[in-house]
Image (tube, rainbow, N blue to C red):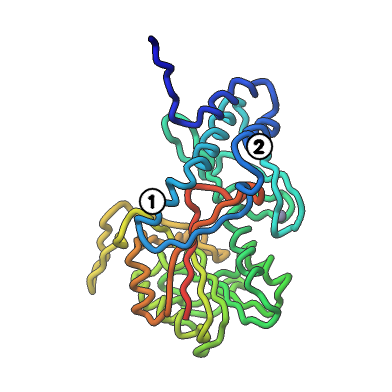
Amino acid sequence: MKKARRENTEPLMRKDITYIQGVQMEEAVEIVRHCSFRDEEMEVIERVLRSPEEFHQVYMDWIRYWHFERCLCELHAYTKKESFFYYGNCEVCNSPQPFIADYRFAEEENGVKKINWRERLVCPNCGCNSRQRYSIRQIFEDYDGEKQILLYEQNSEVFRKVQREIPSVQGFDYPGAGHQPGKINGVDVQDICALNYENESFDLIVANDAFEHVYDYEQAFKEAYRILKFGGKMIFTVPFDGNSMETSRRVEMDEMNVIYTTEKYYHGNPVPGLEKEPLLVYQIFGWDMIDTLRNCGFKDAYGKVYYGLKKAYMGYLPMYFEAVK
Ligand SMILES: [Zn+2]
């Protein structure tokens, strides 16, 4: 007797690909989404994480979402088009929007280009991508009309959107080593290792992709701690390897020299006029960062992963961190 071959990966989605050839990509997304997930499974979910084991567990628990994302990438490859619309609700605009999914910042895996969901799914109305929309969501979620908020960014969509709703918000950009605090081309700049604020000035600090750009990140954490009020919270993102206990230095320094342990790796400089001075990434963080934050005085610190198909928060385990004073 011939045994039926059992596909152990996403059988429903494989079948759907044949069904939906000939329909628009946008319809195909809807069909696959509704065949694969119950309504409540498409709402925003969050999980607190503190270790590589918990990171791995959530990866396993959410594996159907990664299958779904891969399925969309494969379908999109069939269409041979550059982009498609993913329909969902924008929390910044508070309305349904056709989010733009395309191949910007895409990586390739087994010959299929993987859409960078976290950096794309751009709302055509507010211009914010998935990561930025989630960052704004967190700020407003926490806001009670009185809180003092500081963003480690100023020349950004996120800052402008927050400022429109909360005029008291403060912000600056980190221009990299070798610049004095002050103004550069109309943007306030500061050194995140020596901030120009009084102790205990803020209830909430939002630092997206900042701490990887200084060698002495512990000093930068201490500064954030210093200017936070007791009970205040910092939320931030950094390049992070959820499978690793240890932070890995990409750059080693002694008193006289900078030694690149791996290939040099940069992010764009946010300050206008400094486009030719990209910011060096000094380290990719691991779970020991939680201990470092505690050593700097924070009462608690943890990672949080989030996901939500209806509000178009997608990507491979998108994560941010919270540190409570
Ligand atoms: Zn929007």
The amino acid type found where label 1 is placed reads: His
Seen at 30% across and 60% down, the residue is 245
Instruction: Give the side of residue 190 with respect to residue 29, left or right.
Output: left
The amino acid type found where label 2 is placed reads: His
Q: Which mark is residue 12?
A: none
Whether residue 297 is situated above or below residue 248 in the rendered picture? below
The spot of residue 141 in percent (x, y) is 65, 68
Whether residue 205 is situated above or below residue 131 in the rendered picture? below
The spot of residue 114 in percent (x, y) is 50, 38
Instruction: Give the side of residue 165 with respect to residue 222, left or right.
Output: right
* Residue designated by label 1: 56
Q: Nearer the viewer, residue 229 or 112?
A: 229
- SS class of the residue under badge 1? helix
The quarter of the picture showing ligand 1 = bottom right
Seen at 43% across and 75% down, the residue is 300
**Are dots 1 and 2 in contact, CB under 8 Å?**
no
* Residue designated by label 2: 34
The spot of residue 167 in percent (x, y) is 71, 77
Image quadrant in which you'd find residue 92: bottom right
Q: Quadrant of the N terminus?
A: top left
Q: Nearer the viewer, residue 149 or 321?
A: 321
Q: Nearer the viewer, residue 279 or 207?
A: 207
Seen at 54% across and 58% down, the residue is 46
Rounded to the nearest angstrom, the CA distance separating label 1 from label 2 is 26 Å
Image quadrant in which you'd find residue 270: bottom right
Mark 2: few/some/many CA within 10 Å (<14, 14-19, 20+) = few
Residue 310 visible in image: yes
Q: Nearer the viewer, residue 106 or 52?
A: 52
- SS class of the residue under badge 2? helix
Seen at 50% across and 77% down, the residue is 190
- Mark 2 CB lies closer than 8 A to ligand 1: no
